Image (spheres, rainbow, N blue to C red):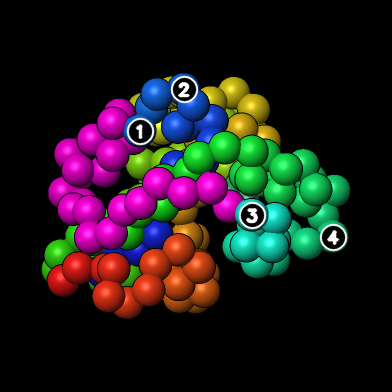
């Protein structure tokens, strides 16, 4: 399986890129696509379209467009998409860092739900929608 992870502006600014990638690698994921970029408002609104209308939407768009981000496609060979995403969500931790377990990325490095360091697709459907926002097919290696 392959799926999308995005290191958000606070993860990049705080110098946590190596640490975050290393955690996925240690669990057996390998990188199949990676870039550094900055989202414009339109693309950020497309990425987070499911949250449109929620109280935190404007702040979320402001935050995620505020600096450089690192989208990655990571792969776990011989794993189904559901199992792979489940493991990634365990490595990343709950959306609210106060509920994220110690030992997860958010549990160890974040304390505020608005600045939670990493985004990861939470289903096969969201991955199919989100990955093409960052990468075309040729950029994702086999
Ligand atoms: P993420 O996993 O990228 O998905 C949506 C993001 O919205 C979430 O991480 C947080 O960064 C942000 N967010 C801010 N407030 C909330 C909230 N109350 N509930 C869910 N997500 C929130």
**Does residue 125 sit above or below 22 in this rendering?**
below
Residue at 64% from the left image edge and 38% from the top image edge: 66
Between marks 2 and 4 in the image, the one whose residue lies nearer the viewer: 2
The CA span between labels 1 and 2 is 8 Å
Q: Earlier in the sequence, mark 4 or mark 1?
A: 1
The CA span between labels 1 and 3 is 21 Å
Viewer-proximal residue, 92 or 59? 59
Quadrant hosting residue 18: top left
The answer to whether mark 2 and mark 3 are in CB contact below 8 A is no
> Is label 1 in a helix, a strand or a loop?
helix
The CA span between labels 4 and 1 is 31 Å
Viewer-proximal residue, 113 or 74? 74
Q: Earlier in the sequence, mark 4 or mark 3?
A: 3
The answer to whether mark 2 and mark 4 are in CB contact below 8 A is no
Q: Earlier in the sequence, mark 2 or mark 4?
A: 2
Which stretch appears magenta? 18-39
Quadrant hosting residue 24: top left
Q: In the rendered image, which residue does mark 2 sit on?
A: 14
> Is label 3 in a helix, a strand or a loop?
loop
Badge 1: how crowded within 10 Å, few (<14), some, or many (20+)?
some
* Residue 73 percent coordinates (x, y): 32, 59
Q: Quick check: is 64 in the magenta stretch? A: no
Q: In the rendered image, which residue does mark 1 sit on?
A: 17
Badge 3: how crowded within 10 Å, few (<14), some, or many (20+)?
few
**Does residue 47 sit above or below 120 in this rendering?**
below
The CA span between labels 2 and 3 is 21 Å
Q: Quick check: is 24 in the magenta stretch? A: yes
Residue at 35% from the left image edge and 51% from the top image edge: 35
Check the picture and name the quadrant holding the C terminus.
bottom left
Q: In the rendered image, which residue does mark 3 sit on?
A: 40
Residue at 45% from the left image edge and 72% from the top image edge: 132
* Residue 129 percent coordinates (x, y): 52, 74
């Amino acid at each position: 399986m392959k799926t999308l992870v995005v290191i958000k502006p606070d993860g990049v600014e705080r110098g946590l890129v190596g640490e975050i990638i290393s955690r996925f690698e240690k669990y057996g994921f390998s990188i199949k696509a990676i870039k550094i970029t900055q989202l414009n408002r339109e693309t950020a609104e497309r990425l987070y379209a499911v949250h449109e209308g929620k109280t935190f939407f404007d702040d979320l768009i402001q935050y995620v467009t505020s600096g450089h981000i690192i989208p990655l496609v990571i792969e776990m060979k011989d794993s189904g998409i559901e199992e792979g995403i489940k493991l990634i969500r365990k490595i990343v931790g709950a959306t609210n860092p106060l509920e994220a377990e110690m030992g997860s990325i958010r549990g160890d490095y974040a304390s505020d739900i608005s600045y939670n360091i990493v985004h990861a697709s939470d289903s096969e459907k969201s991955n199919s929608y989100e990955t093409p926002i960052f990468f075309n097919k040729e950029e994702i290696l086999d």
